[in-house]
């Protein structure tokens, strides 16, 4: 058993699957929402297929894309990690760089195969996102004003893979803002280089404002009957639970960071709870819309995702520091 853990733990750490359930809940929300409302453009196409097929294909595709980004991150950072994070799989020697390249290529292929079930636009969007992930890991993340916004856009774009023509875009916008804020908060709390100047914070805010305007424009064009860019077939009160969840997330992170012993632990907690909150926000949107069966599915994802995240962290610890017996 220990040998198996020692073999799989480096791959799990390389692909960062402990927080990947967030992207699964995002794409599942889009599928469930599209199937639930005939006003959505792709409703007929998704409704005509078995739900299980759509959920499995989207989960495979989103997990593949997430793991691809995580592998690229470690490949680009392997030299820096030798000094700053020598416990990572590549600098510690648990995985060779050549093997990490193979994992990255395999996960990208898996992401593309998962998107095939949803048609050519979804495949093209997946390839575009893969290019965006490459640019982000190679350059954008080293420019905070650009990196925070790009990080949010990648999460929002990945959410749209099952239905690139989604009309109700407010949940996608919330994921964009949530991911951008999490990226900025972890950078600030962990004091990651380079430091963020006042000018960079202003530029990041302007970037978020620009893309918010773009979301509003697209939302208005896809829903001609929208009032203040809100579709008439969605009750305005639907926004209240997700908004409350967003406020609760901010308060929780402030508490966790204050209680953390150092910046690295505080940033890790923000990342962990940020992933959980994406699932909870998807659940909040669905239950606020009165779609109880769909909300149950998303609640199950959140619960099992959090349990899986906790168990995998214990697996890492067990593989790296196995329990032994103390001689008396």
Image (cartoon, rainbow, N blue to C red):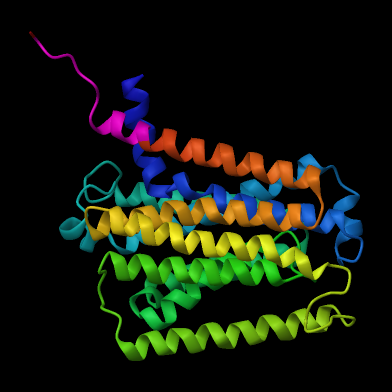
Residue at the outermost left position = 328
Q: Work out which quarter of the rendered image holds the C terminus and state it.
A: top left
Residue at x 36% of width, y 54% of height: 256
**In the foreground, 229 or 144:** 229
Q: Residue 151 location, x and y as percent?
A: 48, 70
84 lies above or below 11: below
Residue at x 21% of width, y 46% of height: 92
Q: How many marks?
A: 0
Q: Residue 327 location, x and y as percent?
A: 9, 10
Q: Work out which quarter of the rendered image holds the N terminus and state it.
A: top left
Q: Is residue 292 visible?
A: yes
Residue at x 60% of width, y 71% of height: 128
**In the foreground, 102 or 277:** 277
36 sits to left or right of 277: right
Q: Is residue 64 visible?
A: no
Answer with the quarter of the image where residue 300 lies.
Answer: top right
37 sits to left or right of 7: right
**In the foreground, 239 or 187:** 239
Q: Residue 254 location, x and y as percent?
A: 38, 62
Would you say residue 258 sits in the magenta stretch? no
10 lies above or below 37: above
Residue at the outermost top position = 328
Q: Residue 275 location, x and y as percent?
A: 50, 54
213 lies above or below 316: below
Residues in magenta, as a range: 314-327
Answer with the quarter of the image where residue 122 lies.
Answer: bottom right
**In the foreground, 27 or 249:** 249
Would you say residue 321 sits in the magenta stretch? yes
184 sits to left or right of 56: left
């Amino acid at each position: 058993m220990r040998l198996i853990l020692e073999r799989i733990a480096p791959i799990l750490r390389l692909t960062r699957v402990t927080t990947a359930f967030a992207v699964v809940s995002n794409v599942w929300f889009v599928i469930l929402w599209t199937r639930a409302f005939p006003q959505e453009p792709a409703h007929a196409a998704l409704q005509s297929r078995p739900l299980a097929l759509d959920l499995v294909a989207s989960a495979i595709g989103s997990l593949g894309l997430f793991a691809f980004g995580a592998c690229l991150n470690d490949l680009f950072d392997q030299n820096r990690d030798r000094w700053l994070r020598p416990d990572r799989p590549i600098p510690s020697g648990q995985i060779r760089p050549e093997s990490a390249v193979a994992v990255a290529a395999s996960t990208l292929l898996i992401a593309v195969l998962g998107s095939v079930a949803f048609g050519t636009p979804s495949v093209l969007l997946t390839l575009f996102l893969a290019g965006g992930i490459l640019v982000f890991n190679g350059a954008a993340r080293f420019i905070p004003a650009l990196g925070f916004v790009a990080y949010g856009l990648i999460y929002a774009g990945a959410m749209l893979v099952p239905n690139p023509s989604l009309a109700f875009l407010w949940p996608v916008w919330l994921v964009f803002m949530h991911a951008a804020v999490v990226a900025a908060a972890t950078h600030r709390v962990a004091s990651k280089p380079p430091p963020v100047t006042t000018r960079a914070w202003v530029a990041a805010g302007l970037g978020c404002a620009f893309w918010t305007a773009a979301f509003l424009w697209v939302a208005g064009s896809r829903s001609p009957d929208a009032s203040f860019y809100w579709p008439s077939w969605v009750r305005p009160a639907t926004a209240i639970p997700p908004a409350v969840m967003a406020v609760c997330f901010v308060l929780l992170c402030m508490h966790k960071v204050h209680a953390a012993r150092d910046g690295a632990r505080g940033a890790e907690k923000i990342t962990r709870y940020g992933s959980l909150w994406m699932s909870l926000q998807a659940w909040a949107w669905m239950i606020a819309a009165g779609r109880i069966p769909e909300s149950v599915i998303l609640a199950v994802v959140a619960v099992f995702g959090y349990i899986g995240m906790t168990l995998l962290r214990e697996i890492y610890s067990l593989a790296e520091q196995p329990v032994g017996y103390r001689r008396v």
